[in-house]
Image (spheres, rainbow, N blue to C red):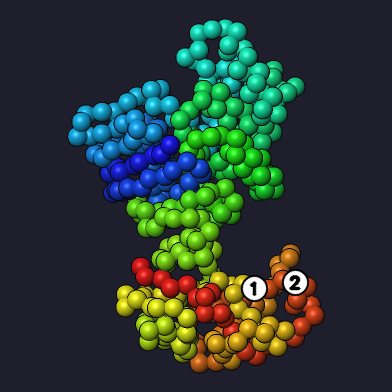
């Protein structure tokens, strides 16, 4: 079970040029709005025809510009969940789900398949409701039921939580994760949310300006994004220009300090990243050797619901440069005085090469 995509498409001044493959499981395309994530899905689904390239799903060629192959959407066995779910407003839940069985002519088989999907998606009692009578989560499950009842070879989810209020997203994300566990085929999700990507995807690709910058295991991508865009999109607050200063060392001119990263540094290093939660104070009972410990001065304290954000500068930091962000749990801040030095573990320094 696999998907291979290698396509190019020009849309005005924007050019999509992507190549990637995904195996069985949940893969994600993570990037800012307008980077080409949704266009990529639409090329796979057959909604947009690429200018050239090739798309192969489980051994079946969906598109090949050289061979003149371009299967219509209804023949691709692709299930596409739109951002707004695209339910038919004048149809009931039951009728909407039945639309996913357009190929099934046996009436009793259609009825059985719809009933099973209603039960699987916990839509019992809502069969006669229309979309406007449903909550956001119920609409999402109905749309997924309409797709899954047709037994697609791949499930494409386009920003699946964008139509939902923020307070519903965490609950529905868990529901969707459970649903995807029962789908024994490929799933490809596009999102601009690092939380959604981290919690849902086994494999992650970082996109920017129509291209895929890097792709790999999701947890490894967060631990070592490798690029400025990757570090930014995965939530790193402190990204600063840096240069190689030794086999394992990097110099940050704007901060006036040099870090030991504990691992080889390539010559083409352009920046480093340090996540806001990675700093620690030596006198807070942390027994790690403080390899990278430097004096600081506190600029600002910002209280959030469950943590504190501290903005600071290193002692020799350029006054024109941005303040550094440090975040800590609220209960720790309440019991400790703020330090005049902070340290960061070598492994927590992200090396960025483009």
Image quadrant for the C terminus? bottom left
In depth, the one of 34 and 281 nearer the eye is: 281
The local crowd at label 1, few if under 14, some if 14 to 19, many if 20 or more residues have their Cα within 10 Å, is many
Distance CA(mark 2)–CA(mark 1):
9 Å
Residue drawn where x is 38% and y is 84% of the image:
247
Q: Which mark is residue 330?
A: 2
* Up/down of 32 relative to 110, above or below: below
Image location (x, y in percent) of residue 46? 36, 31
Residue 68 seen in render: yes
Residue located beneath label 1 in the image: 327
Residue drawn where x is 65% and y is 21% of the image:
116
Q: Secondary structure at mark 2?
A: helix
In depth, the one of 75 and 238 nearer the eye is: 75
Image quadrant for the N terminus? top left
Q: Which mark is residue 293?
A: none
Residue drawn where x is 44% and y is 78% of the image:
263
Image location (x, y in percent) of residue 336? 76, 83
In depth, the one of 49 and 22 nearer the eye is: 22
In depth, the one of 214 and 126 nearer the eye is: 214
Residue drawn where x is 47% and y is 80% of the image:
261
């Amino acid at each position: 079970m696999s998907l291979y995509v290698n396509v190019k498409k020009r849309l005005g001044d924007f050019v999509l040029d992507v190549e990637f493959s995904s195996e069985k499981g949940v893969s994600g395309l993570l990037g800012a709005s307008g980077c080409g994530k949704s266009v990529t899905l639409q090329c796979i689904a057959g909604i947009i025809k690429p200018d050239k390239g090739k798309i192969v799903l489980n051994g079946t060629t969906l598109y090949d510009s050289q061979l003149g192959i371009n299967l219509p959407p209804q023949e691709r066995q692709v299930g596409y969940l739109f951002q707004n779910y695209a339910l038919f407003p004048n149809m009931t839940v039951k009728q909407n789900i039945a639309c996913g069985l357009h190929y099934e002519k046996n009436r009793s088989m259609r009825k059985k398949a719809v009933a099973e999907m209603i039960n699987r998606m916990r839509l019992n009692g809502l069969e006669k409701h229309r979309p406007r009578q449903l909550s956001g989560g119920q609409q999402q499950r109905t749309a997924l039921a309409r797709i899954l009842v047709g037994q697609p070879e791949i499930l494409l989810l386009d920003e699946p939580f964008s139509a939902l209020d923020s307070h519903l997203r965490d609950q529905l994300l868990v529901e969707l994760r459970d649903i995807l566990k029962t789908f024994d085929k490929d799933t490809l999700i596009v999102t601009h949310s690092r939380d959604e990507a981290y919690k849902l995807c086994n494999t992650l690709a970082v996109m920017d300006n129509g291209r895929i910058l890097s792709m790999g295991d999701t947890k490894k991508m967060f631990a070592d994004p490798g690029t400025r865009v990757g570090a930014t999109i995965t939530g790193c607050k402190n990204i600063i220009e840096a240069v190689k200063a030794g086999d394992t060392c990097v110099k940050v001119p704007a901060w006036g300090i040099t870090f030991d990263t504990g691992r080889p540094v390539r010559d083409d290093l352009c920046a480093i990243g340090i996540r806001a939660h990675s700093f620690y104070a030596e006198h807070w009972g942390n027994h790690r050797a403080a390899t990278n410990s430097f004096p600081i001065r506190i600029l600002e304290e910002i209280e959030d619901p469950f943590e504190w954000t501290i903005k600071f500068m290193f002692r020799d930091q350029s006054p024109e440069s941005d303040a550094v962000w440090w975040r800590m749990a609220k209960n720790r801040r309440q019991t400790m005085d703020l330090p005049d030095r902070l340290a960061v573990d070598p492994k927590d320094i992200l090396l960025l090469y483009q």
